[in-house]
């Protein structure tokens, strides 16, 4: 019993110190690509295709970087933005937009997005551009 409790506490400690990235997208294409790009680093990348109360709680309390694909999830993306505004102050969010959404880029920044990327963007390029945020998160946790 004591050993099980110790293992659970160690697991919880590791999870709390591991940067957690949540990708809000329609299919896990970006999520799986980011997992490959960041393999070997201490980063958890989670896929979400909708927002339920559990996902909302995870985003608010445990997520250090939220990536919202505004193109494939227009309604959920807007909901994601509302939740992102309530995230922990040490957390960040960024958005992926298509060309038609470029006019809304300033609004996204005003809502607190650290940046936005216009699609199409390769997974490798997205991972490379997000790497400074991941490094900063790793240092601060």
Image (cartoon, helix red, strand yellow):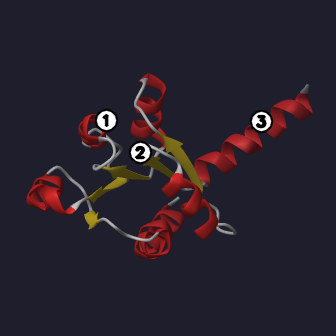
Residue 22 in picture, x, y percent from top left = 47, 48
- Local packing at callout 2 (Cα closer than 10 Å; few below 14, some 14-19, many 20+) is many
Left-right relation of 57 to 72: right
| Dot placed on the residue nearer the N-terminal end, 2 or 1 | 2
Residue 67 in picture, x, y percent from top left = 38, 53
Left-right relation of 104 to 112: left
Residue beneath disc 3? 8
Position of 58 relative to 139 (above/below): above
- Local packing at callout 3 (Cα closer than 10 Å; few below 14, some 14-19, many 20+) is few
Residue beneath disc 2? 24
Nearer the viewer's eye, disc 3 or disc 1?
1
The image quadrant that residue 119 belongs to is bottom left
Q: Nearer the viewer, residue 16 or 69?
A: 69
- Which secondary structure lies at badge 1? helix
Q: Residue at x 43, y 43 (%)?
A: 26
| Dot placed on the residue nearer the N-terminal end, 3 or 1 | 3
- Which secondary structure lies at badge 3? helix
Residue beneath disc 1? 76
- Disc 2 and disc 1 in contact, CB within 8 angstroms: yes
């Amino acid at each position: 019993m004591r050993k099980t409790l110790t293992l659970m506490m160690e697991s919880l400690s590791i999870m709390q110190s591991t940067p957690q990235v949540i990708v809000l997208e329609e299919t896990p294409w970006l999520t799986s690509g980011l997992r490959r790009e960041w393999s070997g680093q201490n980063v958890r990348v989670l896929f979400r295709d909708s927002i339920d109360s559990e996902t909302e709680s995870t985003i608010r309390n445990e997520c250090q970087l939220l990536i919202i694909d505004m193109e494939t999830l227009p309604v959920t993306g807007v909901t994601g933005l509302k939740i992102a505004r309530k995230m922990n102050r040490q957390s960040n969010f960024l958005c992926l937009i298509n060309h038609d959404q470029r006019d809304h880029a300033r609004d996204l920044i005003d809502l607190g997005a650290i940046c936005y990327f216009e699609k199409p963007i390769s997974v490798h390029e997205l991972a490379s551009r997000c790497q400074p945020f991941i490094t900063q998160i790793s240092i601060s946790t």
